[in-house]
Amino acid sequence: MRVILVCALLCPLSLSHACPKECSCNSNTKVVDCRGRGLYDIPRRLSSDTQELYLQDNRIRGLGSMAFREIPLVRILDLSNNSITSLSPTALLGLRTLQRLSLAYNNLRELDKRLLGPIHSISHLDLSHNSLWGLPGAMGDSLQNLSYLGLANNRLTRLDRSLLEALTHLDSLTLRGNPWRCDCQLISLKLWLETYLFKGGVVDEVLCTQPEEMKDKDLQKIPYQLFHVCMTTSYHYLFANIHHLESERLLRGHTHGNHAHPSSHSFHVPLAIGEGLGGGGGGSMTECETKQKQRPVNLRHAIATVIITGVVCGIVCLMMLAAAVYGCAYAAIMAKYQRELKKNEELAAAQRADHATADEKEPLENAIA
């Protein structure tokens, strides 16, 4: 009877410290190391109190629904350097304490917006060296506490502005090695990067690959004048610029309230950073304030905005003038038509009167005869 009791007490203890034969486990640190074991799937019999799971350098090709349901307390999950091509939208379901996730060096083409749905604790996300074409904007709701995002060496040509604006705690961002298309739709990224760098964020570089005239140029250093096509063919530049200037105005008021910078410089700092910094994205605020040569760039920026506004107003005025001319011409034609119609009616009435008089005279002449 005592033997049975001892076994009953030891069984839960042994199950709580279960370790797959393909891995090495440390029950004290709650770390499970399965690196480079040639695994094709997630190992079974993982201890439920596992907090760190390392699965890099294996041959895993996909993750099914609730693939990590055995380890709901895991904080660090490394799946880098596998052959993952597909992820179930519910693959990470249940991992409410996940803080660091690495999916680097895989073959991912897209991510479902529901993948990180219930996870709001994640602070480190590495998606570099995949084949991602983009990220869904709705994913930003789960990344509000993110401090690092790795997107280097994918197939990104642009990024959703709503996703970027949701990353309010982002400190470091990698974007190099993507085929960025530096057209009108990428101006929003340029504006966001300037504000992001001004707040102390770190980014490597955004090298353009298209169009040909901007190839190998860093988006952060391209002056707005080179986007002249956007000014004449699209309103996106104008609206994005107005939004940026409004953000800078609010930011200037905030910094002025904290006495961080003189008001004469606070408006110019973001563009100075966007134009002058390279891959590091760092630099002290004092250095930015002393760069007076950036003021002409801001002046041209403001002049461009005024020109665009003038062009838009001019087009509206021309349309109104054309409508007025058309209205006057139409009124003149209708007046002439009414006059001719009235004249014809008067002639017809006179002819009818003449015929009536002639008809009255003819019976009288016959009676006299």
Image (cartoon, rainbow, N blue to C red):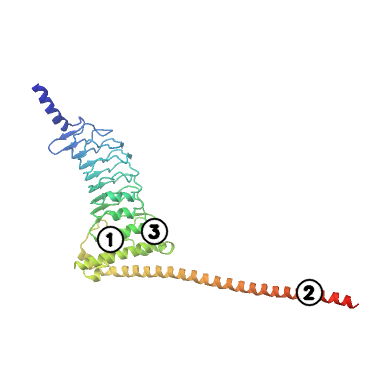
Which residue is outermost to the front?
367
Residue at numbered disc 3: 184
The residue beneath circle 2 is 356
Mark toward the start of the polypeptide (2 vs 3) = 3
Q: Quadrant of the C terminus?
A: bottom right
Crowding around mark 3 (Cα neighbors within 10 Å: few <14, some 14 to 19, many 20+) is some
Q: Position of residue 34 (x, y in %)?
A: 21, 35
Instruction: Determine whether 38 is above or below 4 in the image.
Output: below
Q: 357 above or below 143?
A: below
Numbered tag placed on residue 239 in the rendering: none
Q: Earlier in the sequence, mark 1 or mark 2?
A: 1
Q: Tags 1 and 2 in contact by the CB under 8 Å rule?
A: no
Using the rendered image of the protein, determine whether residue 226 is visible from the camera's viewpoint. Answer: no
Q: Earlier in the sequence, mark 3 or mark 1?
A: 3
Q: Secondary structure at mark 3?
A: helix
Residue located at (33% from left, 63% from top): 243
| Residue 301 rendering spot, x and y as whole percentages | 34, 67
Amino acid type at circle 2 is: Ala
- Label 3 – label 1 distance at C-alpha: 18 Å
Identify which amino acid the numbered label 3 is placed on: Cys
Secondary structure under the numbered disc 2 in the rendered image: helix
Please tell me whether mark 1 or mark 2 is closer to you in this view.
2
Is 319 displayed left or right of 357 in the figure? left
